[in-house]
Image (tube, rainbow, N blue to C red):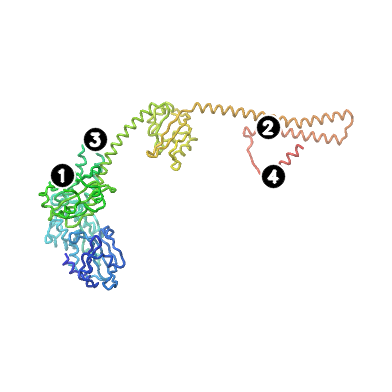
Amino acid sequence: MEILLEKVDEYILIVDYSGKIIFANGKFLKKFGYKKNELCNININEVIANEYLEIDKVSAYKNGVNKELEFTTRNSEKIKLESNIFIDEFKSKRSLFIISKGINESNLTKEHIELLLDNIYTGAFIKDASGKYLYFSKHLSEFFGKSRDEIIGKCDEEIFPSNIVETFKETDKIVIESKVGKLYEDKINLFGKKVTYETYKLPIYDENNNLKYIVGSCKDTSLQNIAKDEIFTHYSKAISINADESQDSLYKLLNRISNSIIEHSNAKGLAINLYDKDNLELKPYITLKNAAKVLARVDKIRISKNEEKAILDGKTFRGFKGINKMRNKTDIEKIDIDNDAIVDIEYLCIYPMIVSNELIGIFSMSYSKEDAPKYNQDTLFEEIADKLAMLVKNYRLSQELKLENQKRKESEEELSLYLDVSADLKSIANAEGYAIKVNGSWEKILGWSEEEIITIHYSDLIHPDDISILENLYDPNCIAEEIKHLTIRFLCKDNSYKWIELSAKYVKDKNVFIFTGIDVTKRKEVEEEKKKLEETIQLESIRNEFFGNISHEFKTPLNIILGIVQLIDKNIELDNISKENLIRHVDIMKQNSYRLLRLVNNLIDISRIDIGYYNLQPSNYNIVKVIEDITLSIA
């Protein structure tokens, strides 16, 4: 591959995952004045002036990243180049490729493009307007098990089985008619097994809007499909397994998934070792093909707390490694393995199964040299390991939950017995305002059965004037874990109401209210009768005081009138009265008569007000003048 990279016209740098430059082609060295031994093994960020490259971020982009990078020459000059940055395989290791060219410079030839396409993981193809293949990448040829000579210059129906041809023709028609690219996923039977693949097709038109080419890419997504869909399907089955079912239910699920993985990966063996945290042991759980032979005499692999931490920190057991390198570098104690079974094994694909920094187990696959993956698939297998870990973890949690639910059910049955024998009202209600559980006393007092009460919202069971009391109790802003006392009226089945005195407590952990109560209707009736009696006595006292005041008001003008009458009679007897004195006394009599008349009219008005004859019409007056007039009227 290095020979090919030396022949292209681009400036090429290849960087490992630590950031060190591991290859620079001659064109780059010449352009920037470096010698090979000067540039290799220094960090890429030492020769880039305007950008800091983070390899993890680049790997997140499926099609790489296009950037304008400014490189520093050996003489500290700055040269800007248009660069394409992507992750690919170099010497069997996942590496960062930086392919650059001068600004507005493009010297790619057909040979260069084919060279690049043949060395990427995704297969590529080009058809002409008639449907004949002009180009078919090496990776895609291997995927379909055909040589390029069998494909180039031929149409689909001359190459592939009829079921594949129909699919290809249909998608060709769709992209041609829509004139836009289409990404689709399909399944085919290939070499006796079901293969899932993803294809992108794009029509290319000339300046006259005539179809010129159909270009596309295709890749095998069978393993991705297992990671995305199949494990999820089995996850749903795992959490539905009853706790009292046989212990091999999880084994059957993992074994089925593992067989699917090994079928689509060409691995020689696969193993899932589950971790026993209490005993610090990895125990072989699933062993297929060669792994079953290798681990035939192994029932447990002991590890220390430090080794557990190293695995969680990614310092061991991670990635794609040679078998000899793995055996020499592992810190795990020697185990009794079948050395004859590992003769044909060249590579191990080993990934820890971790959930929330908890070690669940180790997922590994072994390969012979000829069947080893041609491209590093660490990211995919890490995803599979993570999802397998989630499946095992959630299976365990679901079993624990089912056992806990069984204990909870038993506790609820005991609580139900307690509620039923209690004479007081007892109930449990959720935060939405519905009863979850009530005892039999509610039916005795209100007439509603337990089944009826739990279907009625509190707003339909409480007297309208008392609704606000419970609304405050259920208000999320006011909920507190303290005992509250309230007295409210509950609707009986016969449409009457009864007063219930409740004690309520909110239990935050369970998000429920617990109520206890007693019927205080008779006490309330006695209190109401007592209140009415007190009001009657108070009203009678006010009435007596009113009539006493009225009697006094009547007596005052009457005494004045009678006094003047007696005085006039006496003066008439003595013939000692003048016309002026008589007129003055008569005026006083008239004034007090009017006063009596006003009092009578006021009494009549009070009666009319009581029966609603008058409507109140308030107005603003000078209060000083009103008081002065009243004072002068009785002066």
Residue type at tag 1: Val
Residue at image location 15% in from the left, 44% down from the top:
298
Instruction: Tell me, for residue 298, which label it has, or none.
Output: 1
Residue 429 rendering spot, x and y as whole percentages: 40, 35
Sequence-wise, the earlier of marks 4 and 2 is 2
- Looking at the rendered structure, the secondary structure element under dot 3 is loop
Residue 140 shows up from this direction:
yes
- Looking at the rendered structure, the secondary structure element under dot 1 is loop
| Up-down relation of residue 611 to residue 98 (above or below) | above
Residue at image location 26% in from the left, 41% down from the top:
396
Residue 595 rendering spot, x and y as whole percentages: 74, 34
Q: Nearer the viewer, mark 4 or mark 2?
A: 4
Q: Which residue is mark 3?
A: 244
Sequence-wise, the earlier of marks 1 and 3 is 3
Q: Which residue is mark 2?
A: 604
Q: Which residue is mark 4?
A: 622
- Using residue 601 as the reference point, say whether residue 75 is left or right of it: left
Distance of label 1 from label 3 (alpha carbons): 29 Å
Q: Nearer the viewer, mark 4 or mark 3?
A: 3
How packed is label 1: few (under 14 Cα within 10 Å), some, or many (20 or more)? some
Residue type at tag 3: Asp
Foreground of the two, 76 or 604? 76
